Amino acid sequence: MDQAKPTNEREAPLRVMGVLIPMAGTMTSFGGMKAAVSSVYNCTMLSDTQVEINTDGSYNVFDENLNCIELNKVENSTRGSVECCQEQAYNFRGYEINSTILSLVGSLVFGFTVGSSVLTSPIIAKLGFRKTGLIGVVFAILALLLTTWSTSFYYWIFTYSVCFGVANNLLYNTGMQMCNKLFPTDFNTAATVIASFGVSLGTSIMTPMTVALTDTYGWRIRNYACCAILLFVAFPAVLLWTQPLEGEELDLAVGKKKSEDDEKDQMVENSEKSKMIHPADKMNLFKSVVFWAWLCGTTAWSLDFVIPLDFAIPFMEENGINRNVAGSVMASLGISELIARVICALTGEQKKISKPMLYIIFSLIGAAACFLPIYGKSTADASETTLSVGLMYTYAIIVGFCAGVLNCLIMACTVDIFGQKRTVEVWGYVNLMLGLGFVGGPPIGAWFTTNIAPDLVYVFYLAIAFFLACAIIMAPIPFKLPSMQPYYADEAELNEKNNNNNSNNNREESAMLKK
């Protein structure tokens, strides 16, 4: 019997996508306001009475007590013009912000967004999807407001990186779990991929918005705008989230009550599966070359993931590209990533090329793309012109597509390599290392381009190294994959498997009785 899902359940991925657009966009567009945040003087929340421009080009800047401070042509860091400036006290009391700490704050939020699931999953199980999502939206708004009102940038490590990161996880983790619950079998991949479109759309939409608002009104006004979008877009979308069907209704939705023929087919299929053994089921993970290759390879890629979001706009500005154009370039990265996710959703079940091999191929393509900004800068320096915008668009489109493919393949690759039984265990380790990589990449890049090679172009050499490391470390996996495919168990292995299953079932029954 064909069971059509209710409309509110069919539309759940779109509602999750609506929440992820402002959530992810606020996080990924951080690079668009780095210059303004790190400036001692900027045009944040300016009024006409605070600044008086003299005929000789100097400024009279008035503090809160209307005491005049004489400044000589202090440039606005966000545009390089001399149209306005801001008193020191309003921008973190005028001290210079360390570039490594600035990058750490921007990347640490990614780590908490990915890595705090261990904290938020019990909350989701206790409160349900809608209540947890509403808490996430409110918590995200409060975190942004605290960040905006802070008087020291170092408070951001707590207010932005930790609090906003955990709030993001409350939305992202909850939304993904809801899609998995509502689409447990049919259309599961499509549902989760459609929901994750919000990450790519958020990058595409909110990076240009961040650049425009920061340049015109300052980074604090940009934060207020993000709060407003969360309140008027994400909050109503979460109100429409739904709890999945339970009990008999859930059984019907997943097709448990089928016709007799279907039930017989299912019994045959289950019987066949019960005779299959996956080599990973008996594997000692910590002694496995494949496990360490997958874990270290994905870590190398995650070190690369945030670098374009964090450094591309400052690099383009430094080499003569207008900030608005730079924001559009980053928007193309998000659109390209979105297209990659769509293609992955449509072609995810192809068998011609193994998923680990695809991972290696797209890592190599990403490494090749990172040569484009290097080539563009060398050409511009030689001809004494600005950096080629077309070259940066090409870079953003290729890297965005690679990021979308690699993002979509992580879970699928883990299942293909380790099988369903060990995937949960392996995924825990992978998630932990992904969080560390997201956190570590930008600070490493900032430190490298400050202390080792003091030019932003060298961050792309670092990106090439990370991509190549990912491909090289993963190289053994495709060769080992044929020996890790499920096989029919012999009688001794089948008896051992059945005994283990019976032991597990007895333990579960004992636990239920104790409860």
Image (cartoon, rainbow, N blue to C red):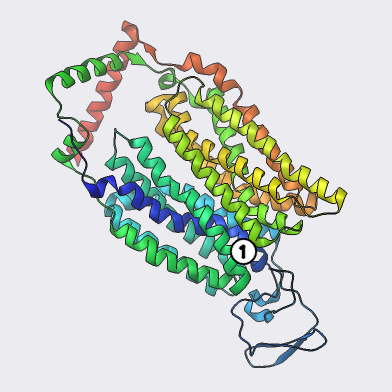
Q: Is residue 170 visible?
A: no
| Residue 233 in which image quadrant | bottom left
Report the side of 283 relative to 11 (left or right).
right
Amino acid type, residue under disc 1 in the picture: Met
Q: 231 or 268: which is nearer to us?
A: 231
Report the side of 135 relative to 148 (left or right).
left
Which residue: 69% across, 57% down?
Answer: 314
Residue 443 lies, in percent from the top left, at 66, 52
Which residue: 71% across, 78% down?
Answer: 83
Report the side of 429 relative to 310 (left or right).
left
Residue 218 lies, in percent from the top left, at 60, 72
Q: Which image quarter holds the N terminus?
A: top left
Outermost residue to the front: 390
Q: How crowded is mark 1: few (under 14 residues within 10 Å), some or many (20 or more)?
A: many
Outermost residue to the top: 491
Element type where label 1 sits in the image: helix
Outermost residue to the bottom: 66
Question: Is 340 above or below relative to 258?
Answer: below
Residue 121 lies, in percent from the top left, at 36, 48
Q: Can residue 385 be seen in this view?
A: yes
Q: Which image quarter holds the C terminus?
A: top left
Question: Is 2 above or below relative to 5?
Answer: above
Q: 175 or 332: which is nearer to us?
A: 332
Which residue: 81% across, 50% down?
Answer: 380
Q: Name the residue under label 1.
A: 33
